[in-house]
Every structure is written in structure tokens, then in C-alpha cells.
Image: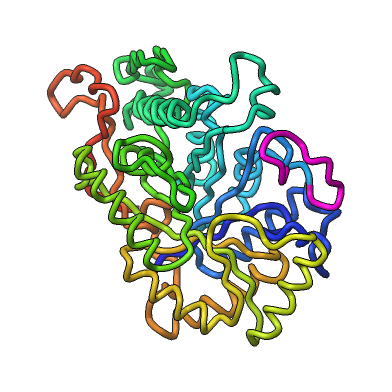
Amino acid sequence: MHLAVALDGAGRHPAAWREPGARPGELFTARYWADAVAEAEAGLLDFVTFEDSLALQSSAPDGPDGRTDRVRGRLDAVLTAARVAPLTRHIGLVPTVTATHTEPFHISKAIATLDHVSRGRAGLSVRVAHSASEGRHFGRRAVPLPDAEAWEEAADHVEVVRRLWDSWDDDAEIRDVATGRFIDRDKLHHIDFAGRHFSVRGPSITPRPPQGQPLVSAAAAAGAPGAADGTGARGLIARSADIGYLAARDAGAVRAAVAEIRRARDAAGTGAQPLHLFADLTVFLDEDAPAADARRSRLDALAGAPCPGDAAVFTGTATHLADLLQDWRTAGLSGFRLWPGVLAHDLPAITRSLVPELQRRGVFRHAYEAGTLRGLLGLPRPSGRYAAPPGRYAPAPAARLAVPSRTPEEAS
């Protein structure tokens, strides 16, 4: 079983910052995030995701809600991950990026840099911006975009990013002081992407990442449409992602979402490509169920509303959560992305109670077995799509939205 944790401020619950040990005065410091990731790595988790957006958090559908009793403001997710990377050794680092208002060239080099800094532990979580409030920070076009168009743009965004990662061959850097040659210019390639949303010449200015292709992930809300016709969040997961996060209320809903995405992948011709599907789950863990229920109820009263989100919310003990995870896993999941209700309380409960319980059941690792995020998830390292086979000229660029071929993972 694979496990990830979503890091979002003081926790998933809006009142989490008011809990003992929440450290609200340190939310915008590097040490706060380094401590959280260190705790996740001590629990041998596969990766952490860093939440981000291009507007202040809000409970209103569009624009600030005016509330002052909830956490507002974020650090940049990519920069936070890069700051934490040298302090960790094994855990994957997956920041959120907004495809709607950012250029894929910038994202490609930022995530490639994170992969170099972390020595092969980078990924990205793609989101789209649906609100006009985010678009008003940029003023470049009418917003919000229609939902289908926003996700179509995100698919092109991912394709450009992937091509730019491949625009340097693995051996493009010569670094030969004696001859004075640092790079082989013939091993840098124009990607010449021309689509409805982007026109990018390339190549990248950053050498190919250690993983070749850092992992691309995306989240689909409960009941989200789109996989059947290749649109929407589920369509993006089916066509373009290595990891998909599925929000669902029960195992039946998970099973239906998994089946829909698998059918869409078969229809798109990507069914043979590896894909990990994780269920999103918010958790409140305590030594006994009544204590967990009481803590969640107290937080709800402080916030004046229950914990938000369309994913299931689990309240109870680590043993009961382990039962649920094993049950849901039979729906076709690779693992779970857990959202601590209160980071200060529930992240240590995950690493120090849930993980040992899963280890006792023989379904979770006892040590990290790979040095890259791809290795942890059992995914091969893909070859560059523009690289020429030995003794042959480089092929023409792949067709739009082509998926790079994959080779067995290199030995670490």
C-alpha cells in the first residue's frame, strides 16, 4: 500500500490553527514545513503534496469571504518544496501548480530544478483555476474559463512540460574541461509545440531531470465528469497523469471512478501505461473513537461549520482506519492521500500509529527501498522521446499529446 499526506496550512479543518501545538505563528516559516515533511519521512510515507493556489483561501465560491477567523495566505508550494528538499533523503515532494495562469515553460524548469535539488524525488500536482478572483490577479483574458476549456488547457500545459523535460538528452552535458565542451548542442532539441493554448519552441534551459520525467498528478472531485469523453479532471488523469487523486464517500464510489478512468485510458490508447490511483481521505485519529468524535465536534463548533471538502472524512482509531484502507484498496486503488484534520495532531498519529498498524498487517514498507519517487512507486524511468538510438539520427518530434515510451528503471 502506498501512502501520501497532503500538507495544507495547519490542517484540513478550518479551525486547526487554534488547536494546541498548531504553531500558527510559524506557518510562514521554512522550519514549520521542514518539520512536517521530516515527520512524514520518519513514517516512511511515499510523498507529500503541498497545497497552493493563486488567490487567498476562501469559503466563498468566488473571491475573498472576509473571514478573519481562518488561516489566510500561503507560501509558494514549489519554493517550499525546494527549501525542504536538501533536508530530506527519501520522501517524494509534490507541489501544486496552477496551469490556468502560469506558463508551462516556467513550470517545467521549476519542477526540473526541484528534481535536481532533491536528486529525483520531485513531482507536481496540476490544478485549474475556476474562479474569477484568481484571474483578476493577472488580467490577461476573460475569466473564468469554461470548465472544459480550462481542463483542455491543462492537458496541453502538461504536454508542453513533459516535452520540455525531454528536450535535453540524458548525456547532453559533456563537462569536458580539457576540450572546453560543456554541452553537446546536437542533444538539445526544439519541441515545436503548437496548439490552441500554447506555442512553445524550446528547448528547456534546464538539463533533463534525474527521473527523466518527474511525476505528474491531478485530483478529481467526487462525481467529477469527464473521463468518458476525455475532458475534465478525470479525463486529464486518464490521458496525462502518473497519479490520480480521487475524492469519494465510500468504496462503491471509488470503484466506479476507478473503472471510469480505466475505460477512458483504454479508449485513449494509454491503458498499458502505469497509473497510480489514490483515494483522498480526511482523517481525525485518536486512541479511541469517542475522543476523535469529540475533537472533530469541538473544531466544527469553533469554525461554525463542518470540515470542508468532498472527500470522505474518517474519525476514529488507527486500527479502524487500517481496516477501511484495506477494504477500499480492493476497489482498484494503489494507495491513499491522507489529509490530517489537524496537522499537529493527526500527522504524528498517521506516522506513529497508522503506519505501525499497517506494518503489522504486512501491507506497508519497513524501510525506504528506492532513492527516487518513481522508484518508490515502482514506475520505470522513461527514455527521452527526442533522443536518437545509438548510431542513428534523432527522430522527428512526437505527435501532439503522444506519451513517451518507457524503459526499465535505471539502477540507483
Would you say residue 63 is visible in this rendering? Answer: yes
> Image quadrant of residue 189?
top left
Which residue sits at x=68%, y=85%? 290
| 99, above or below 341, in the image | above
- Horizontal side of residue 395 vs 99, given as left or right: left
- Horizontal side of residue 81 vs 119, given as left or right: right
What is the span of residues highlighted in magenta in the rendered image?
58-71
- Horizontal side of residue 357 vs 158, given as left or right: right
| 24, above or below 296, in the image | above
Number of callouts: 0
Would you say residue 174 is visible in this rendering? Answer: no
Which residue sits at x=37%, y=40%? 226
- Out of 392 and 378, give the one closest to the viewer: 378
- Out of 118 and 215, give the one closest to the viewer: 215
- Out of 364 and 240, give the one closest to the viewer: 240
Q: Is residue 67 magenta?
A: yes
Residue 154, x across and y down, in percent: 45, 30
Residue 46, x across and y down, in percent: 47, 60
| 235, above or below 146, in the image | below
Residue 74, x across and y down, in percent: 73, 42
The colour scheme applied to this rendered structure is rainbow
Q: Is residue 412 magenta?
A: no
Q: Main secondary structure of the magenta part?
A: loop
Which residue sits at x=51%, y=67%? 44
Which quadrant holds the N terminus?
Answer: bottom left
Residue 77, x across and y down, in percent: 63, 41
> Image quadrant of residue 57?
top right
